[in-house]
Image (tube, rainbow, N blue to C red):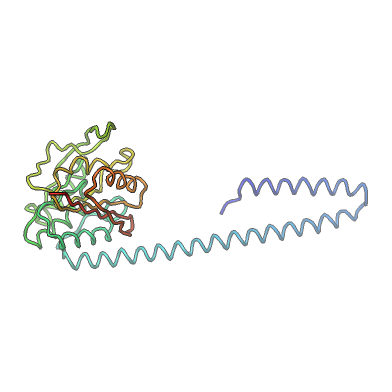
Amino acid sequence: MKITKKDLLLISIFTVAISLITFVGSKIIGNTIYIIAFIISIVFLLFVLAEFYRRLNGHIKKIHTDIIQQSMDNYHQIESLFSLFSTIEPRFPLPEMRKWAASPDLLKLITEIIFTNKPEFVVEASSGVSTIVIALCLKILGSGKVISLEHEDKYADITKHYISLHGLNDFATVIHCPLKAYSIKDKKYLWYNLKNAQFQNPIDVLVVDGPPAATQHMARYPALPLLYEKMNNESIILLDDGIREDEKKIVELWKKEFDSINEEYIELEKGAFYIRVKKEK
């Protein structure tokens, strides 16, 4: 809680005003003005203390509300994590979660999608803990493959390490796809270079969690325009970070360009859009 410029201005004005009143008053009514000035100063001080208390009380209430909300959010993530671990039963450590990586509630949703729809072919824009979770689900189901597109060598290697650690080479592949400039609707976008990506089967589930938002405005928009023709007639898209304005605009643009999709917003830590694709046969 800081003193604002407005506060400093008010204090300065009062100081100048009380000084002028005291000086002029002493010429007119003598020493009595000092008593009056003292009373005015006390009243002003009480006003300042009351205002300070009001602000401090509001600040404390906000901190209290934030702590409660953070505790609830953490509880929800822990609950999702327990559900996730009891479902996929990983034998080895998983990559980092939250922050830039997928949160447990998103991973829990992904497991629900995989086990409910039993996809044969999953594509991920980006890689990480979600790659391992998807592959573990497919391993439990006994079939299926996930291909993850990763533009940074460093993170591709990290995910490959975890794939090998968990014995998931038959179910997951990470492809290094540096970002490439695409022209879509007369606009330039940077997205994963699909030259090295072989899509031998139609995509049943597409998980979009990259490129990073800092890449450019609406960085994840190209996913559907570039992969729509490779999507199965009935398929699912999961767009992470739905809480962000860019992702909301992306979904609105997709809906205008592809009338075969309908979306549902899922309340998660970072928000997500669950999108169903149903092409006309």
The furthest residue to the front: 280
Q: Is residue 26 left or right of residue 90?
A: right
The residue that appears at 25% across and 48% down in the rendered structure is 209
Q: Residue 224 location in percent, x, y?
A: 22, 44
15 or 195, nearer to the observer: 195
202 or 280, nearer to the observer: 280
Q: Residue 187 location in percent, x, y?
A: 29, 32
The residue that appears at 32% across and 65% down in the rendered structure is 76
Q: In the picture, residue 254 is in which quadrant?
A: top left
Q: Residue 110 location in percent, x, y?
A: 21, 58
Q: In the picture, residue 249 is in which quadrant?
A: top left
Quarter of the image where the N terminus is located: bottom right
152 or 111, nearer to the observer: 111
In the rendered image, the vertical position of residue 265 relative to residue 154, given as above or below: below
200 or 126, nearer to the observer: 200
Q: Is residue 42 left or right of residue 109?
A: right
The residue that appears at 78% across and 47% down in the rendered structure is 17
Figure disc tally: 0
Q: Residue 27 location in percent, x, y?
A: 92, 46
Q: Is residue 278 left or right of residue 3?
A: left
Q: Is residue 219 left or right of residue 112?
A: right
The residue that appears at 25% across and 64% down in the rendered structure is 81
In the rendered image, the vertical position of residue 191 relative to residue 25, given as above or below: above
